[in-house]
Amino acid sequence: MSEETRLQKRERHVREAQAHVSRQEHVLEKMRQGGTQSFAALTLLRVFKETLRSSQQVLARLRRGYDADADAPASPEAWSGTSYAQKAREAEELANKAGDPTEKAGWEKIAQGYRILAKGRPSSE
């Protein structure tokens, strides 16, 4: 089996992110039909959409030739996992600064979503 290139890897990430967004939208629709709402489910959808948008932007850069090594094998060292962890820390800081309890809870849920995503990254990708 040949090694996945950086371009192929990013294309896969976009497909996976699209699937996450689609599944979460389906979950939210079922919740709405059942008459329930979930801030956590909405927050997770926002995180998934942001991840999709970010992956699409990186893919576009690769396709435009901004990365000369797009056909090189994907490097485990190139995927440090700091992006979601940093976002989680920033959301935690905003939660600590929030005066309104609802806003604080919202930022805490966003931080929780980013922590889940940060932990879910395989170390070998």
Image (cartoon, rainbow, N blue to C red):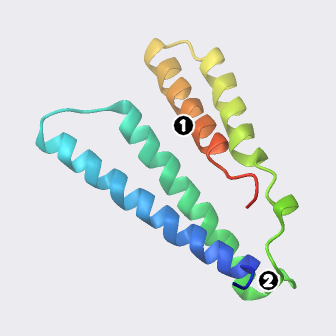
- Name the image quarter holding residue 4: bottom right
Comparing 39 with 10, the one in front is 10
Comparing 80 with 99, the one in front is 80
Q: Secondary structure at mark 2?
A: loop
Comparing 78 with 92, the one in front is 78
Q: Is residue 119 left or right of residue 107?
A: right
- Name the image quarter holding residue 82: top right
Give the residue type that dot 1 points to: Gly
Q: Which quarter of the rendered picture does the N terminus lie within?
A: bottom right
- Name the image quarter holding residue 6: bottom right
Label 2: how many Cα within 10 Å (few below 14, some 14–19, many 20+): some
In the displayed image of the protein, which residue is found farthest to the front?
1
Estimate the x, y position of residue 64 in percent, counting from the top left. 73, 87
Relative to residue 115, is residue 79 depicted above or below? below
Q: Secondary structure at mark 1?
A: helix
Q: Is residue 17 left or right of residue 23?
A: right
| Residue hosting label 1 | 113
- Residue drawn at x 62%, y 35% as measured from the top left: 115
- Residue drawn at x 54%, y 62% as measured from the top left: 52
Dot label at residue 9: none
Q: Which quarter of the rendered picture does the C terminus lie within?
A: bottom right
Estimate the x, y position of residue 83 in percent, counting from the top left. 74, 47
- Residue drawn at x 42%, y 64% as measured from the top left: 19
Comparing 6 with 123, the one in front is 123
Give the residue type that dot 2 points to: Ala
Q: Is residue 30 left or right of residue 112?
A: left
Q: How many marks?
A: 2
- Residue drawn at x 84%, y 83% as measured from the top left: 72
State how far apart marks 1 and 2 are (Cα): 30 Å
Mark earlier in primary sequence (1, 2) = 2
The reply to whether dot 1 and dot 2 touch (C-beta < 8 Å) is: no
| Residue hosting label 2 | 70
